[in-house]
Amino acid sequence: MKRKRKFLLKGKKVTVFGLGRSGVGAIKLLLKSGADVFVTEERAEIPSPLVIWLESEGISFELGMHSRRAIEGKDLIVVSPGVNPRIPILEQARREHIPIIGELELAYNFANGEFIAITGTSGKSTTVSLIGSILSKHGENVVVCGNIGIPVSEVVLNMNKKATYVVEVSSFQLETILNFKPYIAVFLNFSDDHLDRYDSSSEYLNAKLNIFKNQTINDYAVLNKNDKVLSSKDLRIKAKIYYFSSIEPLKNGTYITENDAIINLDGVKIKIPLDGFKLKGLHNKENLLSALSASYLFLKDRFSESITREVIYDFKGLPHRFEFVNNYLGIDFINDSKSTKPESTIMALKCLNKPTILILGGSEKGTDFIPLANAIVNSPFVKMVIITGKTQKRIKSALESVNFRKYKLVSSLKNAIHEAILKAHKGEVVLLSPACASFDEFSDFEERGEYFKKCVDDFFKGNFFNS
């Protein structure tokens, strides 16, 4: 059913905050809707093709600031996920009663089809990819988009027929929703993160819980039974709740028993053997369980055990997520650059079964590294830690607080890779799992992961010191 548009934007004056990919997608959708668009970007410089495009579309814009011009006389403001909605100019816009939404909300109001939305502190991209693959193999017209790298607005702009939108949503995107209502909402796990943006853990959680805000009893909520926060009775979710668990059978949920995934929902019981599932670690089994829950709840009697089994056996995972790079001289090199928080690195440590040299560190987010330090000192496999980045001193302090002193500080990721290769022996692992964001040296975790893979290959091909 075509969703009734909440925003009739023809001739309306709209400002887009932020010129990243989400911002550009929002601009294109706004132009198509007939809005009069103004753009404000805090970066003083942007790529010249982007400037040329803005000028060719007749779009007014400002760089290096968010001035009063961005809100004066405006009917609507669209905020990109990377822009903090509490900056002073946006607080002023609220005082002047100018509606503020995000790119996700904008796109939702123009989309034709149902939404399956996934949030959580970690595992989102793997889960949306699994759900997308399962539904697509069942013949659904599926689009995987959102925080995984493809803005929803960009997809909606080019979609001429009804689709199922499987969307990775971050807390930043959920801060600015009004009407966004997924038919199925999945909350994978919760731990402290982004405390450089949020004043408290509860504020971060409340942003995430917005995923359920507009759901009704006709919708579904899928939650991790083993997460203390998400198994709470105080979440005030109006949708029908279904749990998944990696450690206990559930009377009405999805769980693991021995080496099978069991879908046990509303009187239907389906067993899917996991012998062919390639992804390592308990966290990936949890991602799979949540994907199976969401896929079954969406498909119901159209759900095929054989099709689903084929999909999960073929699924190889995503780049930069505990990704096997190569084996040189008997040493395994693993790229887990996507682990931008300690909780993700702790998960990675649980996948180890060989002596490992761990590369940690990156840009600062105000993270507590003590739980990670405890996981490292208690791991039977972490042989040494090499630390780089702006978080060096705090990681070093956390390790010393638990009496782990087998570490070395280096000045760059390249030096960390070099040191790890020199220290590693046949039958061991070099693991990049930084537990930090990448912005000290790189634009994102993808660039960092690709750099790691290139450096490893270059070293053993004799090009390391020439690059």
Image (tube, rainbow, N blue to C red):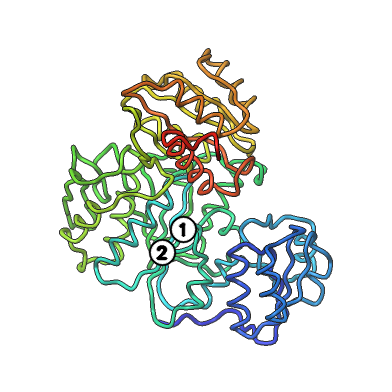
Of 108 and 207, which appears nearest the observer? 108
Q: Secondary structure at mark 1?
A: strand
- Residue 26 lies left or right of residue 46; in this view the side is left
Q: Residue at x 24, y 57 (%)?
A: 311
The answer to whether the residues at label 1 and label 2 have Cβ atoms under 8 Å apart is yes
Q: Is residue 197 above or below residue 181?
A: above
Which residue shows up at 77% across the image and 58% down it?
44
Q: Amino acid at mark 1?
A: Glu
Tell me which corner region of the image, top left, top right, bottom left or bottom right, holds residue 328: top left
Q: Which image quadrant: the C terminus?
A: top right
Picture layout, residue 44 above or below residue 5: above
* Quarter in which the N terminus is drawn: bottom left
Give the labeled residue for mark 1.
168
Report crowding for label 1: few under 14, some 14 to 19, many 20 or more residues within 10 A (C-alpha). many
Please, what secondary structure does the residue beneath circle 2 have? strand
- Percent position of residue 294, x then y: 33, 58
The label nearer to you, 1 versus 2, is 2
- Judge left or right: residue 179 versus residue 278: right
Query: Picture coordinates of residue 297 (x, y %)?
Result: 29, 62
